[in-house]
Image (tube, grey):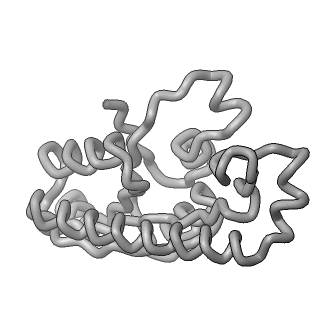
Amino acid sequence: MDGERCIQNRVVVIAMDGSTEAESALQWYAKNIYQKEDQVKVVYCLHHTSHYTMDPSHGGSGWNPFTTFWAANDTKTMAEKFEKESQNATKVTSHIEKLLQKFEINGKVIRVQGDPGHAILTTTEECKATCIVIGSRGVGAFRRTVMGSVSDYILHHSNIPVLVYRH
């Protein structure tokens, strides 16, 4: 009886960032684990990068410690980047909702903001999730050390089981 009750009360958080790896993780979950009784919460975290990616010498596409200070004072450019990122987030969450329909998953998309690893884990706790599913881009050890990795952060800071799907 406890096993049945546990299955019926599964709350699964699926972390999505709009990447093909995240989409593959969702598809794998849909084909291999999903049960109609699951409460699925797909978490998309909008992490505004405008405040530190405003390098005018690269068209705002990279961080440069020598020009970021000056570019950060250009509030018009920052506001434009902020708005563009917000519009992109709306497109991504709409796409995620379509994926849920495509894979016949009854779920809810939750859009949060902030540092992705921390925001996803906070949302997971608020939802009282029983497990987390996340895709991995398979970045190398050097890049993961320098840039960080959301899946690595979640794996090491979560108090519940984490399934990291590597495509």
User: Which residue is rendered at x = 53% and y = 28% of the image?
Assistant: 139
Task: Residue 83 in the image: state x and y as whole percent.
Answer: 55, 76
Q: Which quarter of the figure has residue 11?
A: bottom left
Task: Residue 165 in the image: state x and y as whole percent.
Answer: 35, 37
Task: Residue 60 in the image: state x and y as whole percent.
Answer: 67, 53
Q: Can residue 1 be seen in this view?
A: no
Toward the viewer: 62 or 149?
62
Q: Which quarter of the figure has residue 103?
A: bottom left
Quick check: 27 left or right of 119? left
User: Which residue is rendered at x = 23% and y = 71% of the image?
Assistant: 107
User: Which residue is rendered at x = 12% and y = 46% of the image?
Assistant: 31
Q: Can residue 117 be seen in this view?
A: yes
Quarter of the image containing the C terminus? top left
Q: Which quarter of the figure has residue 37?
A: bottom left
Task: Residue 21 in the image: state x and y as whole percent.
Answer: 35, 40
From the viewer's perspective, is residue 120 above or below residue 113? above
Quick check: 30 left or right of 79? left
Q: How many labels does the image show?
A: 0
Quick check: 79 left or right of 39? right
Quick check: 114 left or right of 91? right
Toward the viewer: 11 or 50?
50
